Amino acid sequence: MIDQADCVVVFGAGLNILTRAFGHSLPKCR
Amino acid sequence: MLEDAAGATERRSPTYQVLVEDLKALGVEQVFGLMSDDTAVFATALDSSGIRFYGARATRTTHRHGRRLLLCHGWSRRGGDRTRPCHRERPARHHLCQPRRLARADHLRRCRGVGRRRQFDGPGLQGFQCRGRARRRRHPHLRRDQPRNRPRRRWPTPQPRRLQGGAAALLLPVNVQLADMDPRQSAAAAGAEATRPPAPPRPQAIEAAAAMLRQSRKPLIVAGPGRGIAPAPKAELEQLADRIGALLVTSARGKYMFRGHPLQSRDRRLVLAFPPPGA
């Protein structure tokens, strides 16, 4: 369901080296 | 988190954050530990503070847990740095407090050719218990002359070794890590208390985000506890998600933020804190 999102709002979070997925599950920006 | 208690402003932080500030104040630059769901929050907090975290993937048997601790121990002794291996996944066991005893057992197993030898990136165990073996190889008659029931050499207790700057095992349950405490109780973190207040958001940014949310049909909210910026308000975000029907996802440090909420995503790909099998 994450990759079907059309809008992502981020609050107090970030991706670092320990998040090895590197946010690939998030939809790509166009 | 700021709270007013007894008329005075009391600053409360999670225990893992206070522990990270303690390690930072002590000058620790590297931390070795097992990477699992239970240590993900602490490891990401270490990484955010600038302390390098060397994570090992958790294995199944407690014997290998001890071996990984030994690898960290050897790395610390070789490099001369004040490293702190951390281990949290299992309750305290006897062999975790006696790394030399476990090294001896591992060395004997290798000599007998029992078991499967594994390859690690870190230093091996050769520096732990190989002096006695080499001495017996050079002087085999010494073993015959020794009485069978001679008293065994007693290794020093782990506590003085810890005080000398060696390895230490840290066993923290998840509820202890997540519990709030007053960091002023920790003397080492007294100098690290200076935190800047979160900057207020710009009206243009709020308007842009609101416009994007109005146009979206499948919104997604990614939330985390925040570090150096404003933490995500849990109750307000849940109300927003209920109103617009957004899916709730957290970062690794905030993975328990929306526990039990019906809109929380069960997809763990975003909060994956260690590489998946085969990666």
Image: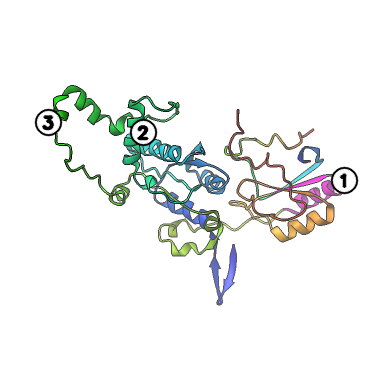
Distance from the alpha carbon under mark 3 to that under mark 2:
26 Å
* Residue B91 point in image, percent of width and height: 47, 51
- What residue does disc 3 label? B145
Is B214 part of what is drawn in magenta? yes
Name the kind of residue labelled 3 in the image.
Asp
Q: Residue at x 33, y 31 (%)?
A: B107
Q: Earlier in the sequence, mark 1 or mark 2?
A: 2
Apparent side of residue B13 relative to residue B191 in the rendered image (left or right): right
Asked whether B251 falls inside the magenta stretch, the response is no
Residue where numbered disc 2 is placed: B106
- Give the residues in magenta: B202-222
Outermost residue to the front? B148
Q: Nearer the viewer, mark 1 or mark 3?
A: 3
Q: Earlier in the sequence, mark 3 or mark 2?
A: 2
Name the chain letter of the residue that bears numbered label 1: B
Q: Nearer the viewer, residue A12 or B181?
A: B181
Instruction: Establish if B147 lies above or below B181.
Output: above
Q: Amino acid at mark 2?
A: Asp
Q: Position of residue B139 (x, y in %)?
A: 15, 24
Question: 10 Å neighbourhood of mark 3: few (<14), some, or many (≥20)?
Answer: few
Provide the residue designation for mark 1: B215
In terms of depth relative to the viewer, which is nearer, B61 or A8?
B61
Q: Residues within 10 Å of mark 2 (few under 14, many from 20)?
A: some
Alpha carbon distance from label 1 to label 3: 87 Å
**Mark 2: secondary structure:** helix
> Which residue is situated farthest in the bottom direction here?
B6
**Discs 1/2, front:** 2
